[in-house]
Image (tube, helix red, strand yellow):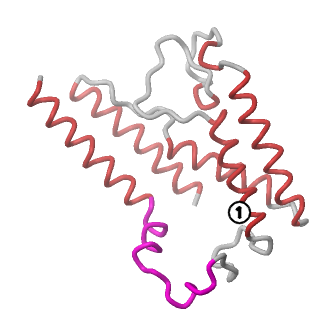
């Protein structure tokens, strides 16, 4: 899933760059939320796959998450003097950097890891494999609220659709007003 999301993120970057050039606007997405989520999910899987202990499945992502968020809070990475944007994924950017959607790994990968730790503590027997049977809401297991399930199942499609609609709407509004 992380690879699929990363491919979608790369396509988003290419398409928004083409649209930026076509319409002479600044709308390129360099390292947006989909980029961050895909990389964070891959890192989470790599860190968690060898871990078998339930306690470690909570402790390891908690320690890593707090460390990454802490680095983001303590160090002002946007003001590190660099002349390149190659470090943008971790939050270190040059003076001319722009992204229409920007979620660097520091601190956001830390937030992702903390969410993974919370999930591991709430679902101690759940693995990285999909469709583990345990649920926090067992009464709903048989009902399966389809609209809510659909939001999770089709989240990337919903995200992309809402982006296209919003960008189109803002473009039309911009042309009307200016």
Q: Position of residue 18 (x, y in %)?
A: 30, 33
The residue indicated by pointer 1 is: 119
Number of numbered labels in the structure image = 1
**In this picture, residue 118 sits left or right of residue 146:** right
- Of 139 and 14, nearer the camera is 139
Q: Position of residue 43 (x, y in %)?
A: 71, 48
Res 117 → quadrant: bottom right
**In this picture, residue 126 sits left or right of residue 150:** right
Name which residue lies at 62% across and 39% down. Answer: 108
Q: Which residues are magenta?
A: 137-155
In this rendering, is residue 78 above or below 29? above
Q: Position of residue 5 (x, y in %)?
A: 52, 53
User: Magenta span has 154?
Assistant: yes
- Of 2 and 149, nearer the camera is 149
Q: Quadrant of the C terminus?
A: top left
Q: Quadrant of the N terminus?
A: bottom right
Dominant secondary structure of the magenta stretch?
helix
Name which residue lies at 62% across and 79% down. Answer: 137
Q: Position of residue 124 (x, y in %)?
A: 80, 70
In this rendering, is residue 129 above or below 49? below
Name which residue lies at 61% across and 26% down. Answer: 91
The residue sitting at the bottom extreme is 142
Q: Bin the neighbour count of mark 1 within 10 Å (Cα to Cα): few under 14, some 14-19, many 20 and up.
A: some
**In this picture, residue 100 sits left or right of residue 167:** right
Name which residue lies at 58% across and 26% down. Answer: 88
The residue sitting at the left extreme is 176
Name the element at disc 1.
Answer: helix
User: Magenta span has 17?
Assistant: no
């Amino acid at each position: 899933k992380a690879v699929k999301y990363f491919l979608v993120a790369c396509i988003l970057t290419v398409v928004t760059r083409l649209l930026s050039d076509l319409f002479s606007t600044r709308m390129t997405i360099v390292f947006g939320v989909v980029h961050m989520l895909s990389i964070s999910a891959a890192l989470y899987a790599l860190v968690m796959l060898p871990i078998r202990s339930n306690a470690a499945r909570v402790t390891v992502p908690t320690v890593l998450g707090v460390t990454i968020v802490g680095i983001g809070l303590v160090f002002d990475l946007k003001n590190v003097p660099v002349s390149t944007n190659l470090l943008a994924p971790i939050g270190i950017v040059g003076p001319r950097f722009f992204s229409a959607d920007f979620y660097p790994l520091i601190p956001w990968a830390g937030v992702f890891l903390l969410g993974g730790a919370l999930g591991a503590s709430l679902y101690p027997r759940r693995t990285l494999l999909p469709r583990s049977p345990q649920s926090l809401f067992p009464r709903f297991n048989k009902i399966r609220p389809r609209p809510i399930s659909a939001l999770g199942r089709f989240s990337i499609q919903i995200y992309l659709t809402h982006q296209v609609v919003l960008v189109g709407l803002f473009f039309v509004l911009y042309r009307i007003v200016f």
